[in-house]
Image (cartoon, grey):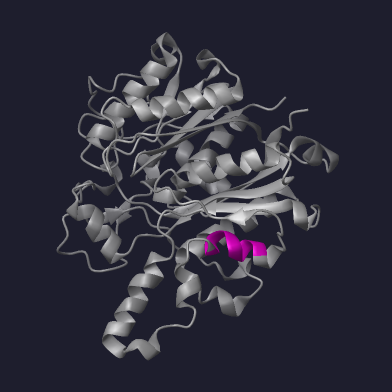
């Protein structure tokens, strides 16, 4: 008998909100969380904008207050989002620790800690480097720390596949429950790479938008005037649960996790295939996993980063995968138009948006749609949310190195 997997809890911290409800309210209204980055001196850089998590006090979410002051921001975002998801699901104390686990992604790990402690060593000597430096920079700490505080003794690790990391993590957590290794998995992603060296690196490779005079209008996926992505940060975690386990405890169910597909471009270290072939294969594989026809999908949450090559390639991939349905009834949107690109956390923050679309019957817009691009000619839900019953939704995440991961969720019932 096939084990079905459902989503029973969610949490997020991102540039638009410190809770799921705040995030969703602002998404649905088409608000932007992009502003001037003031975390470091970027006065000589071509790009000075990004999506920052602001006005955030994390201390109340930690049992060990002393340790909470030592953690890298990426770990903090993961932990708070996971705690929110646990509270939302009502699952605390209602799982077998040996059959509960966590796979929480990050694309960069504790790079803010790496940068700051490296400066300390250069300026003040190696003896001043924190004894917590190593565990704070390790990517797997984003999963490990939540497990330590909540006694999750089941599968626990971190997947790192650049900007596809969160989708890969959620997909693998889904597979773990399907095959019977666990009943409950906390999964998603967290990222805080908004530090000087990473920011400079992306800027020097000409990947970032330079619309410094219009931060809110800088991320414009699929628009003809797009000139690069906008960096973001944050975290999101969902509780995945085996259906019978969820029903036995009377859990509220947001949606069913229906399918997972992946592929590799095998093409270039940073550039995607110009025809979107790798993305197409990931979507095709996800549909096969879900045993669904393309016309059963109502909504695609696109990778949609606002880069000239990436958005055109993804549009080609969607048209190839969905055929006539892509032009007739399919809605496509990009959450990154409002929060920027949270790298390894992006897929998780976007999955929360899809859960809300399934539950609320509202599809958030892709903002900053001002000038149509002949190469991007689908319905991207321009500028205004639309009310629509969403029965099934697909989410794409594509990463440097050619990593592609696609998830499918459907209305439960």
In front: 45, or 156? 156
Magenta residues, as a range? 141-147
Which residue is outermost to the right?
248
Q: Between 380 and 272, which is closer to the camera in this rendering?
A: 272
Asked whether, in this view, residue 308 is left or right of residue 6, the answer is left
Figure quadrant of residue 148: bottom right
Q: Is residue 142 magenta?
A: yes
What residue is shown at x 62% (from left), y 62% (from top)?
146
Against 189, is 127 above or below?
below
Residue 92 in view here: no
| Nearer to us in this view, 284 or 336 | 284
Q: Residue at x 27, y 64 (%)?
A: 197
Image quarter where the C terminus lies is top right
**Does 15 sit left or right of 81 as displayed?**
left
Q: Is residue 319 above or below residue 21?
A: above
237 on left or right of 321: right
Seen at 40% across and 45% down, the residue is: 163
What type of secondary structure mainly makes up the magenta span? Answer: helix
The residue depicted at 29 percent of the width and 41 percent of the height is 219
Asked where in the image residue 29 lies, by quadrant, the reply is top left
Asked whether residue 293 is in view, the answer is yes
Judged from this view, the residue extending furthest toward the front is 266
Instruction: Say left or right for 89 vs 50.
Output: right
Up the image or down, 115 lies above or below 171; here it is: below
Q: Position of residue 42 (x, y in %)?
A: 21, 64
Residue 46 rendering spot, x and y as whole percentages: 16, 55
The x and y percentages for residue 212 are 20, 51
């Amino acid at each position: 008998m096939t084990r079905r997997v459902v989503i029973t809890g969610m949490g997020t911290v991102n540039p638009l909100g410190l809770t799921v409800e705040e995030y969703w309210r602002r998404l649905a209204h088409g608000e932007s969380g992009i502003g001037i980055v003031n975390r470091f001196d970027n006065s000589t850089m071509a790009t000075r904008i990004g999506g920052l998590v602001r006005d955030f006090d994390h201390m109340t979410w930690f049992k060990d207050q002393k340790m909470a002051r030592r953690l890298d921001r990426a770990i903090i975002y993961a932990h708070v989002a996971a705690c929110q998801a646990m509270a939302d699901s009502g699952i605390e104390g209602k799982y077998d620790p040996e059959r509960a686990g966590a796979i929480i992604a990050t694309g960069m790990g504790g790079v803010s800690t790496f940068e700051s402690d490296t400066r300390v060593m250069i300026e003040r000597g190696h003896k001043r480097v924190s004894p917590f430096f190593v565990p704070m920079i390790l990517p797997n700490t984003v999963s490990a720390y939540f497990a330590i505080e909540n006694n999750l003794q089941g599968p626990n690790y971190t997947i790192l596949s650049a900007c596809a990391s969160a989708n890969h993590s959620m997909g693998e957590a889904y597979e773990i429950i399907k095959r019977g290794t666990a009943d409950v998995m906390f999964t998603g992603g967290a990222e805080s790479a908004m530090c000087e060296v990473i920011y400079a690196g992306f800027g020097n490779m000409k990947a970032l938008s330079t619309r410094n005079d219009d931060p809110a209008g800088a991320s414009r996926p699929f628009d003809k005037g797009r000139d690069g992505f906008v960096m973001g940060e944050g975290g999101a975690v969902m509780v995945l649960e085996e259906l019978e386990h969820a029903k036995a405890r009377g859990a509220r169910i947001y949606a069913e996790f229906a399918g997972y597909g992946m592929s590799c471009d095998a093409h270039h270290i940073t550039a995607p295939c110009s025809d979107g072939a790798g993305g197409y294969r990931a979507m095709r594989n996800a549909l096969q996993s879900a045993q669904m026809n393309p016309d059963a999908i109502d909504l695609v949450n696109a990778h949609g980063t606002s880069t000239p090559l990436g958005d055109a390639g993804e549009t080609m991939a969607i048209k190839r995968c969905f055929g006539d349905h892509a032009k007739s009834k399919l809605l496509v949107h990009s959450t990154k138009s409002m929060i920027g690109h949270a790298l390894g956390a992006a897929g998780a923050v976007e999955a929360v948006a899809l859960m809300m679309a399934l539950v609320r019957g509202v599809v958030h817009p892709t903002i900053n749609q001002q000038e149509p691009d002949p190469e991007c000619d689908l319905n991207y839900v321009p500028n205004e949310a639309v009310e629509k019953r969403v029965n099934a939704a697909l989410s794409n995440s594509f990463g440097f190195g050619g990593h592609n991961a696609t998830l499918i969720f459907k209305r439960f019932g």
